[in-house]
Image (cartoon, rainbow, N blue to C red):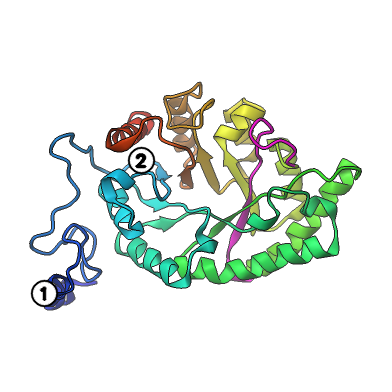
Amino acid sequence: MNRRHFVATGVTGVAGAAMAGANPFIPPPEYPPGHYPPGYEPWTDPQQGLTKGSFTLDYAPHFGMFKHHAGDDLTSQIDFMSEVGFRSIEDNGMRSRSASEQTRIAHALERHNMRMGVFVMNMDGAWRPSLTTGTKDERSRFVQNARDSVEVAKRVGATWMTVVPGKVAEGIPEAVQTANVVESLKQAAAVLEPHDLVMVCEPLNWRDHHGLFLRYTPQSIEIMDAVDSPSCKILQDLYHQQASEGNLIDHMNAAWNHIPYFQVGDNPGRKEPGTGEINYKNVFKHMHEKGCEAIIGMEHGNSQDGREGELVVIEAYRKVDPA
């Protein structure tokens, strides 16, 4: 939006919002980020004080993480996330939302120039033997999930979608299971490639998700090399990898060209950085020095409840962000 259009529509936008009883703390969509109508006050907390300003790395909260400050409305939560410096969000359950709600979310992200992170592509096959079985039905269901996800991704402006290949298939040799997974990923990648969309396969630890097939970085690299598609990459969740294999920086380096997306949470506990054993200050410094531009999903809970707990999360990322 250029300045001339902003001036021409500004008064009308304010009046319309007032007549509609709009939330005075949410700028109407006519206003670009940083240019707010009279009466609008950016999110502040005079009692506690919110530290503002962008982060060096692109951390992505999820809905509900700041509901005590922003309320239940999803676009209000996006407004709040932007105000305190976050530049992306992620939402595992995006596919289950209505088209109208997806559109509202997309408009809010566009208003704040924020990116949409991952949503889960194959929730129906993630937690049972599915791709590992190699059956025609499972493969067809997975490829259809890819087709259905294309429209969702376009609607919300997403590029990446999470894939969990499912549980180990008992009685089938591991090499055969790997071949089954590779073939399903190849077929789904062929659906996504024309749209420049990327499914990111996530290794998960057995402490929290016992029996899942994909666990380790070397295993993930082997599968990516076999699929050999720009639409099939790795989602490296450092919480899970610390629990499964540790040695985070070396494994990250080995798979770097296969990783367009990260997720984090401290271990144990899966809460914000600083609550567990991972030295996120050094890990994020290393990622920044390697030129990381990936979204880093904040896939964890808050260690403390309420508004105070939400402030603790924000300040935890301030402390470990490589300034």
Could you classify mark 1 by the number of other residues whose Cα lies within 10 Å: few (under 14), some (14-19), or many (20 or more)? few
Earlier residue among tags 1 and 2: 1
Residue 233 place in picture, x, y as percent: 64, 51
Q: Which residue is mark 1?
A: 15
Amino acid type assigned to the residue bearing label 2 in the image: Thr
Q: Is residue 204 left or right of residue 94?
A: right
Q: Secondary structure at mark 2?
A: loop
Residue 256 place in picture, x, y as percent: 60, 41
Q: Quadrant of residue 65?
A: top left
- The answer to whether residue 113 is visible is no
Residue 190 place in picture, x, y as percent: 71, 67
Q: Which residue is mark 2?
A: 56
Q: Magenta region: which residues? A: 194-212
Q: Is residue 186 left or right of residue 98?
A: right
x 16%, y 72%: residue: 6
Q: Determine if the magenta segment contains residue 205.
A: yes
Front position among marks 1 and 2:
1
Q: Secondary structure at mark 1?
A: helix
Quadrant of the image containing the C terminus:
top left
Residue 300 place in picture, x, y as percent: 48, 38
Position of residue 113 relative to residue 318, above or below, is below
Residue sitting nearer the eye, 45 or 114: 45
Amino acid type assigned to the residue bearing label 1 in the image: Ala
Q: Quadrant of residue 304?
A: top left
The residue sitting at the top extreme is: 277
x 48%, y 69%: residue: 98
x 43%, y 29%: residue: 273
Position of residue 307 relative to residue 182, above or below, is above
- The answer to whether residue 238 is visible is yes
Q: Are marks 1 and 2 in contact (CB under 8 Å)?
A: no
